[in-house]
Amino acid sequence: MNRLIFAASAAALALAVPAAAPAQQLPPAVIAVVDTDRIVQQCTVCTAANQQLQAQLQQLQQRAEALGTPLRTEEQALTTAVQALPAGQQPDAALTQRIQTFQTQQQNAQRELGARQEQIQRNLAFVRQQIGQRVQPAVVQVMQQRGANIAVERGATIAINPSVDITDAVLAVVNQNTAALNVNAPPPQQQPAQQQQQQQRPQGR
């Protein structure tokens, strides 16, 4: 009796579950190669944005020199004044105040230059993000036109046939969008105070 029940159950299950569909055959791989580094350097709006970023770096260097020159001069003067003190004698009130003022100015300069450098790094990342948003759909468009189903970065290849390189075509599509890139990244988003406190609060066991 148990055998009959088992056989009947197996037969019913076989009827209820459809046969597995055969695996879909994948199409042959058609690979295209893209040199995105060259696109970032040569596209029209990319070149303009790179020039503006370079100008920001030059301004940072000029500001660093403007702040650093008087600080170096004052540092040398303070070193000479301290070395001129008799052995064991401490700086007087005037010299002590001068040293403290120098240290404050030095810290302020470092803070200002650090903030400017971080802003330039954010600007660079922001520009690359915008370029990527234009390059990706351009690559897809050219792939569809050329019948490719895989795109790889030129730097990841060892040797290629020039006929599979679609960089020039992608560059031409990217250049159709003449809207300038924004080289000033938005300020980083500030987390709510409550969220910061939760992150800083040690977790219980």
Image (cartoon, grey):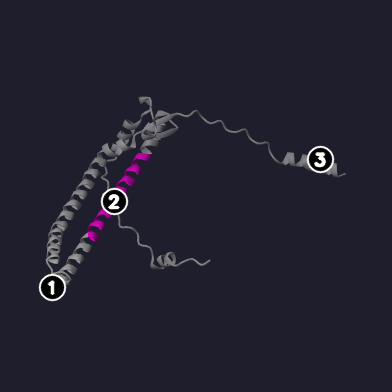
Q: What separation in Å lies between label 2 and label 3 (alpha carbons)?
A: 71 Å
**In the image, which residues are magenta?**
110-136
Among the two numbered marks 2 and 3 on one chain, the one whose residue lies closer to the N terminus: 3
- For the residue marked with disc 1, what is the amino acid? Ala
Q: What element carries label 3?
A: helix
Query: Crowdedness of circle 1 by 10 Å Cα count: few (<14), some, many (20+)?
Result: few
Identity of the amino acid at label 3? Ala
Q: Mark 2 points at which residue?
A: 121
182 relative to 200 in the view: left or right: left
Amino acid type shown at disc 2: Gln
Q: Which mark is residue 94?
A: 1
Where's the N terminus, which quadrant?
top right
* Spot occupied by residue 130 in the image (x, y as percentages of width and height): 32, 46
Membership of 126 in magenta stretch = yes
Label placed on residue 7: 3
Q: Position of residue 203 (x, y in %)?
A: 49, 66
